[in-house]
Image: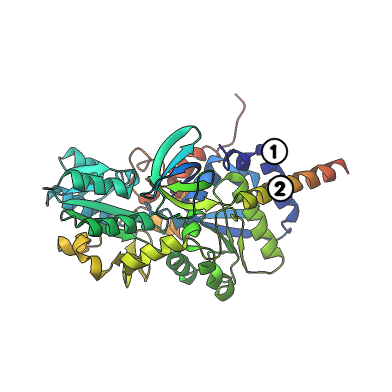
Amino acid sequence: MKYVDEFRDAALARNLAAKIAAEVQPQRRYHFMEFCGGHTHAIARYGLAELLPASVRMIHGPGCPVCVLPIGRIDQAIHLALERGAIVCTYGDTLRVPASGGLSMMKAKARGADIRMVYSAADALKVARANPVREVVFFAIGFETTTPPTALVLRQAKAEGLKNFSVLCCHVLTPAAITHILQGPGVGPAGDVPLDGFIGPAHVSIVIGYAPYVPFALGYQKPVVISGFEPLDVMQSILMLVRQVNEGRAEVENEFTRAVSADGNRAAQAVMDEVFEHREVFEWRGLGEVPDSALRIRPAYAEFDAEVRFGLCYQGVPDHKQCACGEILRGRKVPTDCKLFGTVCTPENPMGSCMVSSEGACAAHYAYGRFRDIPVVAA
Amino acid sequence: MCLALPARVIERSADDQLLIDLGGIRKSVSGALTPEAQPGDYVIVHVGHAIGTVDAEEAERTLALFAELAASQAAEDQA
């Protein structure tokens, strides 16, 4: 496929790996966080970690929207379907995320909840049109990539005067999460979580542009390279980060020039701005409450806001005691440090959020890397 | 979740829908977020919406960069 296959060439990947190995300085360690789950998935799936020299360590960040969705929000969606009789439409990724009381949206469905998987926010609107006597709620999750489509359906619902449609808005913001990581305990030269730079999101940056990352480069002196999701993109971005570290620079560089500009997609930003405003605080799974890190529906669209319409009150729910997702999302632990990893917590039966989506650090390591650390012994 | 793929635009209809071709599969997606996308362009498709366009020249430039790297590597290997 065009713009996909060319960026997966194995020989070129080996060249890039050789270049990185030649440019890393001896005695120096490089710790880069890939914020986005898409990169985590690519690094695991294409075995990129193996191509890198031992001194380059990749840390999986909190940029998997399913992974950072708190239990309390899924409980709200299940409550709407089971107790309030609403049809809840959602992206497939959220269905298996563990919720309270041993439930998930999938298990609630088995108990009779009318929960439907949709491919697009626009499909949720179709469900509402087709079921005028039922309440239809779109459970909207995701970063800035998924937000503009939600904004479009809210605008459309208002234009049509739909009376039975609302959105449970759980959209979150990328720059706020990066700030939270940088301000977290232990990050920095003296801390136990060394962080030398970020691989910036590909698709989020199509929408917001690369300008919003400038404060991280300037204020925190952390280089950021916006990277595409194909393996060659990721390798090239790591090379660019290594060069910045070597030269003592901290700038925002854009590897994904074929799709990302400084300002991003203005049309998408305009519709988001019309429909959403910032929340003062939002709970993230694993990170706790993060100020100014999420969006809610503006009062002008209150009749389509499920929280207002159903009088919902958010109730936080603690994670499983043994689950290390929080520490993994902060780069303080790796999946194999977790007692539950691969034993009680597997992709078939996830306990923590990092095991649910294939973009989660635990699921990616389980699927592609769990035999990597075991030495090969001749029979 | 943030899975998105580049697809070629076949046609743009008046209601902001784009007919796209994704490796031989044709599908209709919303073009409301990419008013500039025209037939022949490549758009990045995510959850049924084209969220951005692919700059063909920039894509070529990135590939040329990789090729240059391959050439310099080959020269180093020979040396």
Q: Position of residue A34 (x, y in %)?
A: 53, 56
Label 2 secondary element: helix
Q: In the shown orientation, is residue A4 left or right of residue A116?
A: right
Q: Amino acid at mark 1?
A: Ala
User: Which residue type does callout 2 highlight?
Assistant: Ala
Determine the image quadrant of residue A210: bottom right
Q: Residue at x 51, y 34 (%)?
A: B23
Q: Quadrant of residue A9?
A: top right
Q: Residue furthest top?
A: A379
The quadrant holding residue A326 is bottom left
- Residue at mark 1 to residue at mark 2: CA–CA distance: 14 Å
A77, B17: nearer the viewer: B17
Query: Residue shown at 67%/55% (left/top)?
Result: A239
Q: Position of residue A89 (x, y in %)?
A: 25, 47
Q: Crowding near pointer 2: few (<14 within 10 Å), some, many (20+)?
A: few
Residue picked out by circle 1: A11
Q: Quadrant of the N terminus of chain A?
A: top right
Q: Residue at x 70, y 52 (%)?
A: A20
Say how many tags the image has: 2
Q: Is residue A92 above or below residue A272?
A: above
| Above/below status of A198 relative to A117 | below
On the image, the x and y values in percent for residue A319 come to 31, 56
Question: Is disc 1 placed on a helix, strand or loop?
Answer: helix
The chain carrying label 1 is A
Q: Chain of mark 2?
A: B
Q: Which residue is mark 2?
A: B64
